[in-house]
Amino acid sequence: MNQTCNTWQLEEAYDACGAAVYRLAMVYLGRHADAEDVTQEVFLRLICRAPAFTDGDHRRRWLLQVTANLCRDHLRSFWRKRVVELEDTLPTAAPEEREALDAVIRLPEQYRLPIHLHYYEGYSVAEIAQILKLGQSAVKMRLKRGRELLKIELEGSI
């Protein structure tokens, strides 16, 4: 079921979810330009083929699921360079926050995404499972292992 998204609905969706979409794309892709491209594509898909949303949370979950799918496609793309330096453009308030975010970004993708969605975006295990198309037990295990890796890395930098 498609619905046409008018300008004010698009602006409202972007204001409410644009930063979360961009952050998730940045965590996935590690490059500012790629994250911007994916963010633009996500909101283009919102205009073209969005389902009828039951509420703002439903819309946000849909946008993040589309973001995750597009990022996976982008990473599999022939044109994607395999080794990319992370640009130093992520805004953070304090050096401690930057250190933690850098540690999260350095995690393997399977741990990085659940950690980001849970701790930075505030999603529950069930919601993360839905967004990443995983079982809840897989999400719990990835969160556990991701926290263990973060602990080792952050303790090593003290």
Image: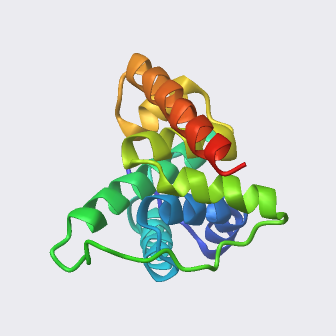
Q: How is the image coloured?
A: rainbow
Give the left or right position of residue 147, taking residue 138 as reference: right
Residue at 44% in and 20% down: 136
Residue at the top extreme, as displayed: 137
Q: Where does the image place residue 57, in percent across and percent down from the top left? A: 64, 40
142 horizontally vs 117: left or right: left
Does the rendering let one see residue 47? yes
Regarding residue 54, the answer to whether it shows in the image is: no
Where is residue 83 shown, x and y percent of the image? 30, 74
Front residue of 54/109: it is 109
Identify whether 103 is placed above or below 43: above
Residue 74: give x, y in percent of width and height.
Answer: 29, 67
Q: Reply above or below: 102 against 65.
A: below
Choose top left, top right, bottom left or bottom right for residue 22. bottom right
Give the residue at x 58% y 46%. Answer: 116
* Residue sitting farthest toward the left: 78
